[in-house]
Every structure is written in structure tokens, then in C-alpha cells.
């Protein structure tokens, strides 16, 4: 991490988000991503994690959603009503949940689409070479149709494509979703490497243990609000976080136990 005097690369202040003019999903969310850091966003299904990423990256518009209060600042500039393409050009790239690669296109063609905002040929070539270095598996499959690759390879391709935009801030929405443990390990290692190369990262994850182990700082969302925040390593050893999110090997189990934990807490209070 850089010194505290460096302004945060991303600052979200008291943001409220409403879908369809009626359904309020975020209720005054604030967070900061210090330049050069990894920040994790945790929370149960439906807590608003993806919505928060959409609010940051200008994608709410496509979901009939809007920021109705608060501000988002990227690199110190107000981007609350920012257009997603302009944000990519300014250095923000997002890997959406579910590995939205172009299935009929080859690995190389997919990667090329990631550089759509750039015209600097030498820079694009350098990014491509960096992606090949980070993901040797993609290098072996350059001409392969992406839709036939494994889930892990597709996730690597989705991250590689985002890196082709040469982002200073990378937003990752559940990169470990549905992947085998060994591949999950690799994905998190790559997240650390990407961060080590200087890219700030916002990581939305259901795999709280993994996310907290790579995150400098983390926020826990509950029904559209920040319920808890702290340094990754502190939250990793926080009894409440352990009970709610780190309770078992299966995330489903820990999320199911969330309800009964709350129930117990309410009745014992
Ligand atoms: P998950 O882990 O299941 O992806 P999440 O924490 O990312 O959950 P969101 O996907 O942001 O949560 O959803 C938060 C709430 O907003 C949910 O109640 C969801 O139904 C609602 N929601 C999400 N997208 C839309 C939309 N386009 N229109 C209306 N409601 C939406």
C-alpha cells in the first residue's frame, strides 16, 4: 500500500441506489479504496454487492437503476453520473459476475475486445504480452473458441480481457464463483500479482476467507448498508465475521447459518 497521504483512487460517499424508480437497494454506502490496495466487499446474496459495483462503473443505467443520492469519485473526479465507456478510458475495468466472455470468439479475439477504448498499438501489445505472462494457459489456447474452455480458463480470459484496457482500478465480481478449489487458489494468486504490478482492486466475493486473506481492507454489506469494515486480517479473526461468513467449508452453509445466528442474537439480546 502507498502512504496515507495519497488520495484514494476510489471514493464512494453516502450512495443510495434505486431500481425502476422504486426499489431502494443501497442505503447510504460509503467506502474508500486507497491507491494500490485490494479492497474486498463481502455480504450475503442480495446484500447489494453487484449493485455497488454497477454504481461505481456506470452500469446501473443498463439495469434501469440510478444513484439517487451521494457521490462516486474516481481519481478525485466526480463520476457519479459517469458513462461506463468513459470510465474504462479513464482506467477502470470490470469483470462481471458469470464470466461474460464472447463464447463464439477465440481467446485472442476476446482479448482484442478488451482494448476497444485504446489506440496505442505499442501499449496494447505490451498489455497482451503481460496477459500471456500472467495466464500461460491462455497463451496455449490463443486460437481456441472461448466457449469450449473450462470455467477456470474462462475466468482467466475474463480477467485478461479486463487487463487489456490497462486499468488502474480493476473491479472483480465473484471471480471464484463455481470454480474448483485449486483454480480458486490460482485466481486469488493472480489477483495478488495484478495488485503487485500496481493495479488497485475491488473484489466482491462470497468466499470470505479467501477474499480477506488477500484484502488490505474489507467492507461487509447487509441489506444495502455497510454493517462492518476493517483491515482484511483483522476481519479474518473477528468472531462475528467468523460466525457469519467463515463458519464452514461451504459458503452455502455459512450463509444459511447467518439467519439462525441473527435469530439467536436477536433473542438473546
Ligand atoms: P448476489 O451475491 O446474489 O449476486 P448481491 O449482493 O450482488 O447478491 P445485488 O445483485 O446487488 O446483490 O442485488 C441486491 C438487490 O437488488 C436484490 O434484492 C436484487 O433482487 C435487486 N436487484 C438487482 N438488480 C436489479 C434490477 N436490475 N432491477 C431490480 N432489482 C434488482
Image (spheres, helix red, strand yellow):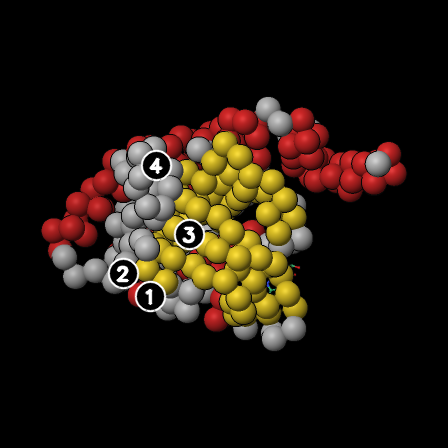
Mark nearest the camera among 2 and 3 is 3
Q: Earlier in the sequence, mark 2 or mark 4?
A: 4
Residue at x-position 22% and y-position 46%: 127
Mark nearest the camera among 3 and 1 is 3
Above or below residue 118? Residue 254 is above
Q: Earlier in the sequence, mark 2 or mark 3?
A: 3
Instruction: State the residue in front, 163 or 43.
Output: 43
Gap in angstroms between the C-alphas marked 4 and 1: 30 Å
Residue 87 in sight:
yes
Task: Give the residue pinned by disc 4.
Answer: 4
Badge 3 marks a residue whose secondary structure is strand
* Label number found at residue 11: 3
Proximity of marks 2 and 3: CB atoms separated by less than 8 Å: no
- Badge 4 local density, few (<14 within 10 Å), some, or many (20+)? few
Badge 4 marks a residue whose secondary structure is loop
Mark nearest the camera among 4 and 3 is 4
Q: Residue furthest front?
A: 5
Q: Residue furthest bottom?
A: 21
Proximity of marks 1 and 2: CB atoms separated by less than 8 Å: yes
Residue 144 in sight:
no
Instruction: State the residue in front, 136 or 120.
Output: 120
Numbered-mark total: 4
Q: Earlier in the sequence, mark 4 or mark 3?
A: 4
Task: Give the residue pinned by disc 1.
Answer: 85
Q: Residue furthest top?
A: 237
Q: Earlier in the sequence, mark 4 or mark 1?
A: 4
Q: Residue furthest right?
A: 267
Task: Give the residue pinned by disc 2.
Answer: 89
* Label number found at residue 191: none
Amino acid at each position: 500500500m502507498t502512504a496515507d497521504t495519497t488520495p484514494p483512487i476510489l471514493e464512494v460517499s453516502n450512495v443510495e441506489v434505486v431500481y425502476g424508480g422504486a426499489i431502494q437497494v443501497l442505503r447510504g454506502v460509503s467506502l474508500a479504496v486507497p491507491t494500490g490496495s485490494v479492497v474486498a466487499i463481502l455480504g450475503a446474496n442480495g446484500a447489494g454487492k453487484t449493485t455497488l459495483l454497477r454504481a461505481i462503473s456506470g452500469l446501473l443505467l443498463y439495469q434501469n437503476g440510478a444513484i439517487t443520492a451521494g457521490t462516486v469519485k474516481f481519481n478525485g473526479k466526480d463520476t457519479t453520473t459517469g458513462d461506463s465507456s468513459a470510465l474504462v478510458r479513464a482506467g477502470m475495468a470490470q469483470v462481471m459476475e458469470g464470466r461474460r466472455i464472447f463464447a463464439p470468439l477465440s481467446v485472442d479475439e476476446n482479448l482484442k475486445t478488451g482494448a476497444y477504448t485504446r489506440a496505442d498499438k505499442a501499449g496494447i501489445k505490451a498489455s497482451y504480452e503481460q496477459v500471456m505472462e500472467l495466464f500461460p494457459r491462455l497463451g496455449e489456447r490463443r486460437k481456441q473458441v472461448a466457449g469450449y474452455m473450462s470455467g477456470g480458463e474462462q475466468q482467466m480470459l475474463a480477467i485478461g480481457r479486463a487487463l487489456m484496457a490497462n486499468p488502474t482500478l480493476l473491479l472483480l465480481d465473484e471471480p471464484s464463483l463455481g470454480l474448483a478449489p485449486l483454480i480458486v487458489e490460482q485466481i486469488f494468486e493472480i489477483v495478488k500479482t495484478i495488485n503487485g504490478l500496481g493495479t488497485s482492486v475491488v473484489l466482491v466475493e462470497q468466499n470470505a476467507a479467501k477474499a480477506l486473506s488477500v484484502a488490505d481492507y474489507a467492507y461487509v454489506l447487509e441489506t444495502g448498508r455497510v454493517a462492518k469494515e476493517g483491515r482484511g486480517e483483522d476481519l479474518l479473526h473477528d468472531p462475528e465475521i467468523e460466525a457469519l461468513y467463515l463458519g464452514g467449508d461451504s459458503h452455502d452453509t455459512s450463509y444459511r447459518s447467518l439467519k439462525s445466528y441473527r435469530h439467536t442474537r436477536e433473542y438473546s439480546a
